[in-house]
Image: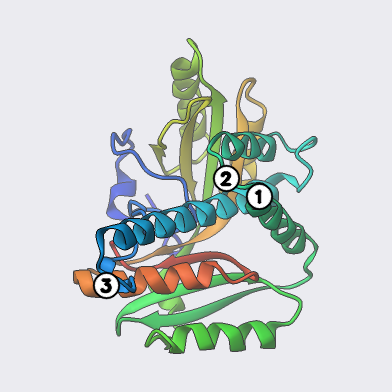
Amino acid sequence: MFSRSFVPSPLAARRHLSTSPVQWAGHNKWSKIKQKVFSVRHLTSNSPDTTKKGANDASKSAAFQRATQDILVAARSGGVDPDKNAALAAVLKRLKAQDVPNHNIEKALAKAVKVKSSGENSTYEAIACNSVGIMIECATDNPNRTAQTLREILNSRNARMAPVGFMFVRGGRIVVGVQNGPDAEALLDAVTELALSQGAEDYETLTESDSQSRMKFYCEPSVLSNLTSELKKRSGVYILESQLVHYPVNKTELPDEDTEILEDLVHALEAHDDVIRVTTSANQI
């Protein structure tokens, strides 16, 4: 079914509706995104109160980072003005309902403006835990400065820059949403049939929010533009994301201790102002 240029997973050969809820995030396609709550070994105290506070702080930090990624994705596909970008408006409404602080939202919007206005997008390749490939997509006006900062982050966590592009392929990813209501399920079924007829190779459901239901579709790069256009024409459907992303050719299994190290590294990379998205070849991340 797939060309050699796009082999996301053996699962892609089956056109079926996944029943596994998947968190919407900027990591790679086939892994369930684990909540980035640091182990208590990262905390400075073993007291119950400190441990609980540290875990809560880490959980909030991860949630705010996911909020930033949601805003970036929505802005990349439709601009940074919520009055003209329905997807971005929906994201902002959801984040405010989740009590994400305004300063986090404002910082994410400022980053989105920078991404839209930057004349140069760069992808940096790295390896961690001796076997995990990492693709770091950035928008920067100073690639040398960005590369140096990324090296410092990588080196501090026993990772390094390395050519790992052969571990990944490029493919199209589209996320659509519909407002929840009595006709939402039927509309998503109709959208799924439309997407498959227009070149989508696989799809999955995303965890529902209070206000919307969402589907994620995968395709080869050559059909991304046309598939997006056809989905936009469907009444009641809005595009939340349409972009080319990296998919790992093969997944790497890691022991628990390396998984924690990699999660910490990914979190640190995503916190960098120039980073748009981080994709790893690890099965757990």
How far apart marks 3 and 2 lie (CA) works out to 27 Å
Q: Secondary structure at mark 2?
A: loop
Q: Secondary structure at mark 1?
A: helix
- Left of 80 or right of it: where is 149? left
Q: Secondary structure at mark 3?
A: helix
Is the Cβ of the residue at disc 1 closer than 8 Å to that at disc 3?
Answer: no
Q: Amino acid at mark 3?
A: Arg
Tell which residue pokes out farthest to the top in this image: 182
Chain-order first, disc 2 or disc 1: 2
Chain-order first, disc 1 or disc 3: 3
Is the Cβ of the residue at disc 3 closer than 8 Å to that at disc 2?
Answer: no
Q: Which residue is mark 1?
A: 105
Dot 3 alpha-carbon crowd within 10 angstroms: few under 14, some 14 to 19, many 20 or more: few
Is the Cβ of the residue at disc 2 closer than 8 Å to that at disc 1?
Answer: yes
Q: Quadrant of residue 255?
A: bottom left
Chain-order first, disc 3 or disc 2: 3
| Image vertical order of residue 128 relative to residue 107, above or below | below
Q: Amino acid at mark 2?
A: Val
Residue 196 percent across, percent down from the top left: 46, 34
Which mark lies nearer to you, 1 or 3?
Answer: 3
For the point 45% across and 57% down, which residue is it? 62
| Residue 41 - label | 3
